[in-house]
Image (cartoon, rainbow, N blue to C red):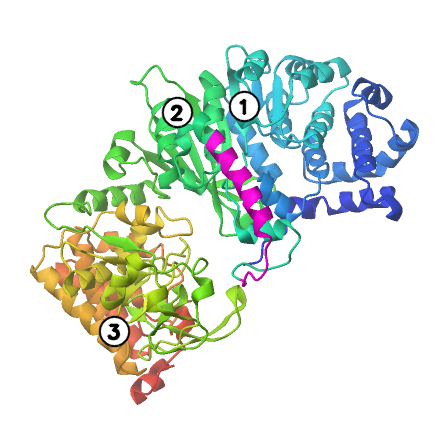
Amino acid sequence: MTAPCSLESEYLRPTEDALRMVLGKNRESDFELRMQILEAVSARFGGYELAKFHKVFGIQSVLPVSSLLELAAPVASEIERSPIQSALALSILSREPLQEQDKKKTGAYHTDFRLATRLAQLAASRITYRSVVIDPACGTGILLAALTYAVCGLDRAKTSYWLSHCVCAADLSKNSLRAALLCLASFTDDLEAIKLMRNRWFCGDSLLANKKIWLDMAPEGFDAVIGNPPWEKIKLSRHEFLKSSGTKRHYGAQINEIDESCFATERHKVASYSQELLKRYPNLGCGEPDLYIAFADLFFDLCREKGIVSALFPGGFIRSQGTQAIRQKMFSESSCISLSVISNQAKFFTIDTRFKFLAVALIKDTENNQKRKPIRLLHEHGTSTGLDITGKVTIGRKSLTIARTGLSLPEVRSNAEWRLFLKISRAGLSWMDAQNGWRPKFCREVDMTKERLKFLRSPVPGALPVIEGRMVQGHRFGVKGYISGTGRRSIWETYPIGESRILPQFWIKSSDVPQGNRHRIDKVRVGFCDIAGQTNERSLMASIIPEGVVCGNKVPTLLFPDDPTEERLLVWVAIANSFVFDWMLRRVLTTTVNYFLLQSLPLPNVVKKGLPWNRLVKAAKRLRELDKSGATYDNLQNIARLRRQIDAEVAIAYGLNVKDMELIFVDFPLLDRQQVALPGEDKSTITRDSVLSEMEKRTGIGYGAWTRRMEEGNNIGAVAYVPNEFSIKIGAVGRDKGGVYG
């Protein structure tokens, strides 16, 4: 998906145009002149003398000060016309231009003005203009500028004291610190205050800084720590190395030439840095550590008792296995916790609009374990100038410990959803439960990158088809076939339901499959797509994988060595494709279905060889047969009938009723968009109506309303469980003809 243009860049486009105009075509890329013009704008807003500012901070004017002030006038006027507060606008405009590879290397995805204001509001509620604050990864100072405005407002006396004694900052880049200085200077005409403030700042790697640096700034710790740390992993792939070297390429493209010596040198540097951080921040865990975890640890350590940490973190902070240690530390040592889930739909960052992140506020309290307030979970949606709260949930810490042993936080949007999540968690069983024995052996059979050189473009005797994620859907194997292209630009054909077949992009010889995984080739197992999303039509899609194929790393497979029967695989695939399990997964999912997330969810109490077990086995087995029985209307109706029976069976095993399932279906608004809607309604709800009809039938609770809706939908040709990309509207005529449905 193409990354969006950020909203703040749209707001400041007239200001950028004014800047380009005063810079002139010959000096448009002159960063020093740009910075001096912005310093002149800052002087206009703050009221200080620009010449003295340059002298105090050793800046050699590239033009006479009078000329700089004159050039700054139209820029200042455009800033005043924008909806962004002037100091925040200056911070945005003074960002050093970075290439995409530099952004990846430094993690420098800048903070949107709306998010800066929100974090500042969270922190300002706990501090005054006499509180000592720091941003240890300050960039161009937008968070400190927002906090200054939130704490001091337009009171110049408070602002002067605040800047003189309380505002601290650190960053790797001298240019970023210079930008932070000019943006904060725009609040005051007190050059001495600005000088005192700048003398406390640190230019260097905050993560490896000597503790004395922080003690000199705040001997008793900081009253507030605010920040948006880098979100990158500490790693270097061949793809990233080539891009940083200036090679234009798309992800997944073949790597033909690379300077292995230079790559090895750079990779060694990255690995050494990673090891150094692991020594200092043991909560980083292992593998490829995330920079933001180390910063989260630093933020919390810098904060004093009863102080506040206000920060932006990726969504993985509340759900991933790698953040468990730092999450448990921060949660257990905080008296108040507020977490806001925010998506990028409002164009906060120039990244995928589906990306989710968190605004986190924690009151540090390591001493009093008795006064731990419930966790406050918010959902916030970006507007043109700020954020609106769209959901509020109160999560008791004891209940969370019962439902989520690693304190990963489910993304529930209301107290009703939290109660439902708890209900399912309490009714379900752990995968390791002795009675049921769900002890899976997960595997990524071949790596699409590491084994790429061994892949074949056409079959040869003894070669195995390589199965990719797009070839797997719920209860379907062989959904799409390869046509042409490479990587993300490859073209695939979609096969109608009932006509699945295997036409892969690659083959691989069985002897080239990693030795430890070859035994799986001759076994029936389950595979699932690990790329998913909370807002997709469906999140978890799993199917039975037959013998004689090998799965790529985007289709992890699982076996049950303790019970290697095909029955257990069929029951698991039925559960995994159910709406209840999908709903639970959506509460903890970001973009990847990993083993940790899957096994953190409870499975229903379905006893082996019991009646529910046998029903699930029979239905899942029949669905596998129908996957290749032809694209007919009758076939589709049989598939829909079996799948609604599975969904009802699984829901009842979790102890759910019709009302519970109504709430679950609210989370799947993209279903049935290509089906015929009931008269007077905007869209079809045939899948929901079918499942709730089955629930009415099975539980004996209800008045047949959902059954009537299902029958009305069937009468006009709507078919349940047809993914939108595979369907066309049949209508009553097509239904009566009973023809092919493609």
Residue 390 seen from this side: no
Q: Earlier in the sequence, mark 2 or mark 1?
A: 1
Amino acid at pointer 2? Cys
Residue pointed to by mark 2? 336
- Which class describes the residues within 10 Å of circle 2: few (<14), some (14-19), or many (20+)? some
Who comes first in sequence, dot 3 or dot 1? 1
Q: CA distance from mark 3 to mark 2?
A: 49 Å
Expressed as whole percent of the image width and height from the top left, the position of residue 666 reads 35, 55
Q: Residue at x 42, y 67 (%)?
A: 682
Name the quarter where the C terminus is drawn.
bottom left
Q: Are marks 3 and 2 in contact (CB under 8 Å)?
A: no
SS for tag 3?
Answer: helix
Q: In the image, which disc is placed on residue 48?
A: none
| Mark nearer the viewer, 3 or 1 | 3
Answer few, some or many: residues within 10 Å of disc 3's Cα (few below 14, many 20 plus, some between 14 and 19).
many
Left or right of 1: which side holds 81?
Answer: right
> Label 3 vs label 1: CA separation?
57 Å
Residue stretch in magenta: 253-276
**What element does badge 2 sit on?**
strand
Res 536 visible: yes
The reply to whether discs 2 and 1 touch (Cβ–Cβ < 8 Å) is: no
The residue type indicated by label 1 comes to: Ala
The disc placed on residue 124 is 1
Question: For mark 3, what is the residue?
Answer: 639
Residue reaching furthest to the left: 610
